[in-house]
Image (cartoon, grey):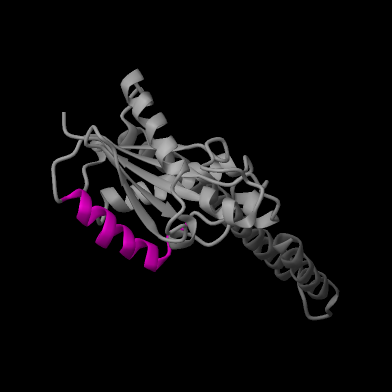
Amino acid sequence: MKQKQLRGPLALLAAALLFSSCASQEQYQDAVDLAKHYQDQLLNSELALAQAEAKNRKLTSEFADSQMQSMGDGAPMDAALRRRLDELQQRLSGLSSNPDGISKVSLDDGSYVFMVSEKVLFSSGSDEVNSEGRRALLEQVVADIKTSAHGRIWVRGHTDSVPVVKASTLKKFPHGNLQLSVARAIEVASILTGAGGIAQKDVVVAGFGPHEPLTTNDTAENRRLNRRVEIYVTPMK
């Protein structure tokens, strides 16, 4: 569009010089050359901008992948861990207190989990941790984790079952709730390993979307409980 807008005035300039009684063929050619020069500059600028935008998208994608790889380290979920997580899921399913804050549940093997409500961390449909949520993660979760030695930490994102329909949210998360839950887990893990100072090699991220609810999604209160991030801390081996 900008190229077309520029071509019009410059062409008019050349035509005016051509038909002017005081204009020479040399002046006309100079005007044509000038128009071509600026059109070439505009084309090069638009090409550079498109390349920069493509590079930015590529780097953003690579960063997200590297975060998942560096914090996950390809760690398989063994049978013992799966059993502990199943036990944890049963314990959390019966947890009804403090649905809008941070709750901590301890298991018999020395592991524990922080269940952090969506309301503490995110606006609806967003993966950006707000300032209050960041402070809560650092002052409550990280501070608690650092009081004793620990093993691997699993950051698990969860949503309710309501499909993503808002156009702006779908544009960012075209795969819906599952993609949103992964993005949220990455953002929380980034705070733990960044400002929180927890080693990246100790942190694994995972997103489950609506597939591991704490309760049914049949009421607003239940859906609020299901929208959460769990920070599951295993004991030191």
Q: Nearer the viewer, residue 170 or 76?
A: 76
Q: Picture quarter containing residue 86? A: top left
Q: Is residue 116 magenta?
A: no
Q: Position of residue 56 (x, y in %)?
A: 48, 49
Q: Residue at x 65, y 49 (%)?
A: 170
Secondary structure mainly formed by the magenta segment: helix
Relative image position of residue 213 (x, y in whole percent): 54, 40
Residue 76 position (above or below residue 174): above
Residue at screen point 16% across, 28% down: 237
What range is drawn magenta here? 128-146
Q: Residue at x 65, y 65 (%)?
A: 34
Could you say which is closer to the camera, residue 88 or residue 63?
88
Q: Quadrant of the N terminus?
A: bottom right
| Coordinates of residue 49 in the picture (x, y in percent) | 55, 54
Looking at the image, which is closer to me, 143 or 70? 143
Q: Splitting the image into 4 quarters, where does residue 38 fall?
A: bottom right
- Residue 70, image x and y in percent? 31, 35
Specify whether 141 is left or right of 93: left
For residue 28, which quarter of the picture?
Answer: bottom right
